[in-house]
Image: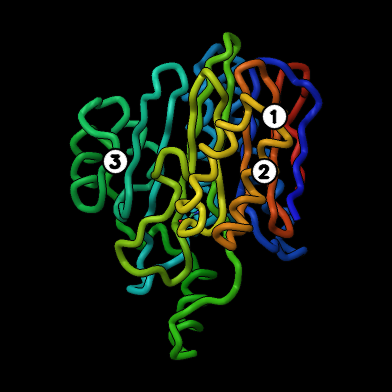
Amino acid sequence: MERVTVFEPVGRPAVLVHGGAWAIPAPEHGAHLDGCRAAADAGWAVLAAGGSALDAAVAAVVVMEDDPTYDAGRGSFLNRDGAVEMDAAVMRGEDLAFGAVASVRRVRNAVHVARAVLESGEATLVAGAGAERFAWSVGIERIDPSWLVVERERERYDAACARGAPTFTETFGDTVGAVAVDASGRVAAAGSTGGTPFKLPGRVGDTPIAGAGLLADDTAGAAAATGHGERILKTGLCRDALWRLDAMPLDASIAAALERLRRRADGRAGMIVVTPDGKLAAGYNTPAMAHAYRAAGMPTAVAAL
Ligand code: GLY
């Protein structure tokens, strides 16, 4: 069943983040809420200082990439080789500028590389070793990829190997994302992920694909998704929700896109949306989705599951 919350009219500027949609275990609720709150506060700090929606969305995602709670940056799931491989993307609604990277290993913040791809104007999606070389060429630090691996994920990987059946039946979805609108109604979206546990090396999900994992268009809004990328890709979840806004209210658009995902692709996911006039909403058809938002007049971000 789809669950959609439209937050009180908050106006502009505003930022909304998510930390993944899945059955988050109760003992982990605090960490997921705290991380989302810190990310929304970081995004808000950029907006309050007059920064752009894109800068705010990136700042929020960086906080969650650096937080090992989430499947993004440090703390990402390990692939079948026991390595972290990350996808990330950013999109600006004013001119549809888009930048994304896939399967990068030796950078700390994949979202910074995605942002650099956008700024380069030379490409929109760059993958693997080429993306890493591009990152280093624009001054992004090269790191030892072991820094990205945390004990929790090493144990999860070892358990999967010991089972001798390298498949996961659990539903995981700690991908992170942010959407923001600035004071003049310009929107942006950013997302980052380590993908799915024990994924095929080189596997790419929805996160770096415009229209699926995120979309930003000042004529409609900005959206960022989380969940099982193979399914989200099939229905183009973010595009589906934003295109419906011409014909239906925000909450109904999100619910309809999630319902279609479930009905047509058996997909479980969550998403966040901001509109150019400053409406914010979060929806999911999973047991929970950590999210947080902040706008003018709020002393700190408000987080919920
Ligand atoms: N939603 C993230 C992924 O499937 O890679």
Labelled pair 2, 1 in contact (Cβ < 8 Å): yes
Labelled pair 3, 1 in contact (Cβ < 8 Å): no
The residue identified by callout 3 is: 125
Tell me what residue is drawn at x 34 percent, y 40 percent.
100
The residue identified by callout 2 is: 256
Viewer-proximal residue among 298 and 210:
210
Q: Secondary structure at mark 3?
A: strand
The local crowd at label 3, few if under 14, some if 14 to 19, many if 20 or more residues have their Cα within 10 Å, is many
Looking at the rendered image, the disc whose residue lies closer to the viewer, 2 or 3, is 2
Relative to 99, 191 lies left or right: right
* CA distance separating discs 2 and 1: 10 Å
User: Residue 106, how many percent across, how many down?
Assistant: 29, 53
Tell me what residue is drawn at x 33 percent, y 38 percent.
113
User: Residue 168, how many percent across, how many down?
Assistant: 52, 76
Viewer-proximal residue among 287 and 36:
287
Which comes sooner in the sequence, label 2 or label 1? 1
Relative to 121, 85 lies left or right: right
Q: Label 2 sits on what residue type?
A: Ala
Viewer-proximal residue among 159 and 184:
184
Vertical relation: 267 (above or below) 280? below
Q: Which mark is residue 236?
A: none
Tell me what residue is drawn at x 35 percent, y 69 percent.
200
Q: Label 1 sits on what residue type?
A: Met
Q: Which mark is residue 248?
A: 1
> Is residue 214 among the parts visible in the rendering?
yes
* Quadrant in the picture for the N terminus: bottom right
